Amino acid sequence: MNKMLVLMTMCCWIAAGAAAAVDGGEKAGAPAGAVKARTFNVLNYGAVSDDKTDNTEAFSACLKAVIAAGGGKMFIPDGIYRGRIIIPGTKAWITVEIAGESEPTPVWGTIGTFVFPKNGTIIKCLSESGPAVISAANVPEKLYDRFSGVNVSLRNLDVRTYDNPGIGGIDLLNAAQCKLENVFVNTDIYNVQASKPTRGTAGISTPACNNGALTILRNVMVTGYHTGILVNEHTDGDNINLGSNINGLEFMFNHHASRFGRVCAQRCTHAIAVTGKHGFSIEQLDIEIAGRGQTDDNNKWQATAFDINDPNSLGSGDLNYWVVEGGVGAVEKFTRNGGASIRARRIGSAPAVTK
C-alpha cells in the first residue's frame, strides 16, 4: 500500500469517527462526554405540539436529562406546546439552552387588528396563577443565596399567555445568569386590542440583585403585560421592543448599572418606570404615543401618561430619546414624573438636562 493510499484511508477513518460522534451527540440521552455539545429533543420525552396536551412533565423530563449531562440544549421543534417549562436548580455552574426551531414572528403596532400567527415554536400556558410559562425554580439545589448555578439561554421562542395575564411570561429571578435572543413574550392578542393589565405580572423578570453578573437581552419583544421587562442588575440589552405595557422597562434596586442600546416603547403607559435605586443608560429610547382617535374605551390606558415615571427620583440615568405621535409624526413632547437624576436629551438637541 503506497503512502498516498494509507493517508486517504486514515482520513476516511477520522471523518467517519467524527460523524459518528456528532450523530451520537444529537440523540437524546447520549452519554456525557460523547461530544461537547449535547442536544435533547423534547419529542423524545413525550412532548406533543397539538395545542392541547399539557407538556409540563415532558419538559421536566427533558430538562432533567440536560442537567444530568452537565448542561446542554433542550430543542423544541416548531409547533404549539401547552404547559410550563420549569428549570431545575443546580449547585454547579452549568449552561441550559432552551431553543426553538425558528425565530418567532413579531406582531405589534399602533393601529388596526391582526390575528396572531401559529408558526414557529410556541410555548403557551393558560393557568390563572402559579409560576411563569418559563421559570427558574426556587428549590434547595442552589449555588448560593437564592440563585441556582444555571446559566439560562433562551433562543427562538414565542411565549404566550392570555389577555390580562395572571402569570408571568419568563421569570429568571432565581437564575444566576441568562441570555435571551429572538424571544417574543405576549398575551396571544394584538397589543392594540389588549385589555389593561391589572395583575402586576411581568413579561420578563431578569436574575435578581446579587446574581452571577451576566444578563444579556437581544432582539426581545414583550406586549400586553403590566411590566414588559423587570430589570435587575448586570443587564445589557439591545433591540428591545415593548408594546402596550403599563411599564415598558421597570428598573428595580440594584448595585451595578444597566445598559441598553435601542429600546422601542409604543403605547406604554410609562416607557420607563423606576421603583428602586438603579443606574442605567439608554442610547436610543424610541417612543410612539397614541394619536388622536387611536384609543377607545378598551385601550385608553395605552395613552402615555409619563415617558419616565420615577416619582421618588431613585434612578440615575442618561438617555437619548425620540418621540413620535400617531398620525402626526415626530414631536418634541417628553413627559416625566420625578426622575431628578435622569438626564434626558432629545436626539439632535442641546446637552442632556434633568428637568
Image (spheres, grey):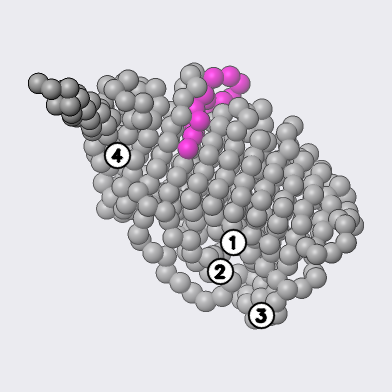
Residue 109 numbered tag? 2
Q: Is residue 309 left or right of residue 40?
A: right
Position of residue 160 measured from the top left corner of the image (x, y, whole percent)? 44, 53
User: Tag 1 or tag 4, which sits nearer the N-term?
Assistant: 4
Question: 133 or 16, which lies in front?
Answer: 16
Marks 4 and 1, Cα distance to the nearest angstrom?
A: 31 Å
**Distance from Cα at disc 3 to Cα at disc 2:** 13 Å
Amino acid on which the number 3 mark rests in the picture: Gly
4 or 3: tag closer to the N-terminus = 4
Q: Which residue is mark 4?
A: 42
Q: Residue at x 73, y 73 (%)?
A: 330
The chief SS type of the magenta part is: loop
Label for residue 122?
Answer: none
User: Given contact means CB atoms under 8 Å apart, are the residues at marks 2 and 1 in contact?
Assistant: yes
Q: Is residue 280 above or below residue 91?
A: below
Q: Nearer the viewer, residue 125 or 190?
A: 190
Q: Residue at x 27, y 53 (%)?
A: 50
Q: Secondary structure at mark 4?
A: helix
User: Position of 38 compared to 264: left or right?
Assistant: left
Circles 4, 1 touching at the beta carbon (< 8 Å): no
Q: Is residue 344 above or below residue 207?
A: below
| Magenta residues, start to end | 136-153
